[in-house]
Amino acid sequence: MKLDYDVVVVGYGGAGAAAAIEAHDRGAQVLLIEKQEKPGGTTTLSTGLMMIPKDAKKAKTYVERLTGSVTDQESISVFIKEAGKNVKWLESLGATVEKLGRETIRGYPNVGRSSPGFQVEGAEEIEIYTVKGGYLAGENLFGILKSAVEKRKIKTLLNTRALKLITDKGEIRGLVASTRGKQITITARRGIILACGGFEYNDEMKRNFLPIPLEAFGTPGNTGDGIKMSMEVGAKLWHMNAISPAFSYKIPNVGMVSHFMPTARFIYVNQDGRRFCDESSLEGHTSWMSVSNYDIKKLRYPGIPSFVIFDDLGRRAGRIGHFRSGFAKESGKTWSEDNSKEVGRGWIKKGDTPHELASKLGISPDALDETITKYNEACTKGTDSEYHRTALESLDTPPFFGIAIFPALGNTQGGPKRNSKCQVQNLEEKPIAGLYSAGSLGSIWGFLYQGGGNISECLSSGRIAGREAAKATLARDVK
């Protein structure tokens, strides 16, 4: 079976949808293929937040600091310029977009947390927007994009996995895919856009590229297909060790569940029963750095997993877990408001004393007792001399509770290196004709991840890739 299109987009998430819409609106005949049974990808599992720069020059300084000088300035400049158009573009598709206040962002996902770099020069020029309809609005955002794809009658193929790129004299001419057990060949007259995500569910790639062991908390379709295909045609990789994990719970027969502490009545302890950070100031996407140290004597990461410890007042303060993102939300379960059901299920361990709780968690009873006593003394004094935590509330109301937390990947950032036109580059950093990428497959975020950065980039890079592919010279047409 053979198909013939101007532009073929691989991956029907936010980036792929944006690319398909833009390419179509530029006059290209577009095919959009998706590996899984339903579209959405990581976008539907996300918060749906978008970072929007106000002043391009000042915002560039900010983004440069967060990318750690591993992303070229032209790509940063183009990203900032294009990201500034995201709100109006979404509104043109029928979305209602709203700006979130800084304090709202600081409240996610733990008391006192803030987005990385808020104290960095230029941070005041970054605003956060979302599609109206709820704080975790990834599904709302993708709903707008999906409706726009359907309104344009863009051809889509689900359950279709791209296997191999077809080349001719150094140019990308199409791809081989598998759909419902059948192999098909698809010609791409003007270009192929890879928007098929990262490698969260590829254990071999994670072992080789990532700085610490990480659980997967994204779409199972992200197994590094775009990375492997682009490498086969000579693409250069970048940002392969860049990640944006957040602490999550590993629930049996459910999966990874979002960690959220609505109160300051908690501490984190490692496997030795000791605190290791200022718990109230960790930023969600960079919290993994607090558990990245490796114990060379015991040959382990003492903070993976760690444990969140809280008392009965903390338990009753509100739910500490959410099924509202990740595939755990499809389990049919909900998290109780006072966490009592989760205690009853054995997900959260309970002890009348710190000693009893520690025994159930498998950590040193004496160490946990000493840690809680020392922390409570700091709360009484109003000064945490160990980690300088400012949000201090005692753990003094038994019983006590604890649950293991793991750093879990929402998505990886690495992949084929792309230029400011979203053209995939070869080892000599020259464009591979006919090959583009968008979204988190080769993202610009190579160091610290800015909350809302991936969604903002998936829309902007998708549009760039779509219009660049659509206007590719007709001389490339397959005869």
Image (spheres, rainbow, N blue to C red):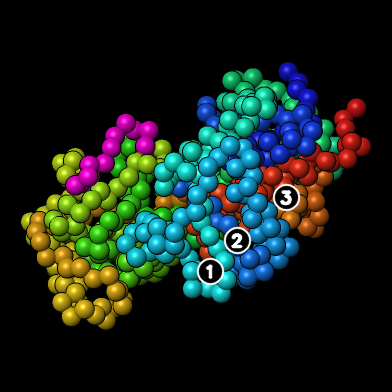
Q: How far apart are marks 3 and 2 (CA)?
A: 20 Å
Q: Name the residue under label 3.
A: 422
Residue 423 magenta-highlighted: no
Marks 3, 2: nearer the viewer: 2
Secondary structure under badge 1?
Answer: helix
Of the two numbered discs 2 and 1 on the same chain, state the one appearing first in sequence: 2
| Amino acid type of the residue that numbered disc 3 sits on in the rendered structure | Cys
Q: In which quarter of the image is the N terminus?
A: top right
Q: Which residue is drawn at 21% across and 78% down?
A: 382
x and y percent of residue 378 in the render?
A: 20, 77
Residue ID for mark 1: 124
Q: What element carries label 2?
A: strand
Q: Earlier in the sequence, mark 1 or mark 3?
A: 1
Give x and y (percent) for residue 476. Answer: 88, 37
Earlier in the chain: of badge 3 and badge 2, it is 2
- Name which residue lies at 34% across and 65% down: 112
Identified at 71% across, 66% down, the residue is 73
Q: Give the range drawn in magenta.
A: 328-339
**Main SS type for the magenta part?**
loop
Res 53 label: 2
